[in-house]
Image: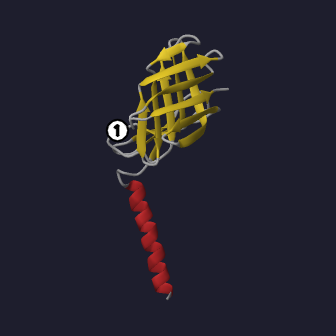
Amino acid sequence: MRRLVACLVLGAAGALAWAAASPGALELKRPCKPNSAPGLITTSSVRILVYCGSAKATVHLGGHTYRFSGGACYRFPNGLSVGIGKLTETASVKPKYRAFWLSTEATKDRTIRDAVVRIQVGGREVGSTKNTLVLKGKRSRGTFTGVFTTGGRGSGSFSCK
């Protein structure tokens, strides 16, 4: 019986070591800096951006409400990006994590047409580029409504600290 247990333990340890060394293993390339810079996790074919900080977002789509928190807002001189969760960048791979991402060109609070909004939930990505985004509070919060790739209308909001 002891030999069987020892073989099982050694076999499991060997399998874990092999999985860690395989090209498909996740590798932390860069840790996330809250509200400053996204982290990066990679495998041989997938890049996952990891956002952390104080940003929150809510999306209403297809009769569901999706809430996201713990993300970051990046204000640039000519734009704004909001990232929350772990965003799978490779389109050919099903997302494994939940994520919200919004990006637009905006130097001040205003109403914008056709911002980019993406959410990843339940192993799929849904996006919108046909929308209206209203920015307020020196680009620290906003609301959006529009048509998503599911064909349905959606709406939502986000806020940054």
User: Which percent across, then down, holds residue 154?
Assistant: 49, 33
| Image point (56%, 31%), residue name | 156
Which amino acid lies under the numbered mark 1 shown in the image of this protein? Ala
| Image point (46%, 21%), residue name | 115
User: Which percent across, then down, holds residue 30?
Assistant: 50, 37
User: Which percent across, then down, holds residue 38?
Assistant: 52, 32
Which residue is the extreme one toward the left?
Answer: 92
Looking at this view, is 156 or 80 the one in front? 156
In which quarter of the view is residue 18 placed?
bottom left
Q: In the rendered image, which quarter contains the C terminus?
A: top right
| Image point (49%, 89%), residue name | 1
Looking at this view, is 52 or 69 the one in front? 69
Residue at which label 1 appears? 91
| Numbered disc 1: secondary structure | loop
Q: In this view, does 54 lie above or below 77?
A: below
Which residue is the extreme one toward the right?
Answer: 161
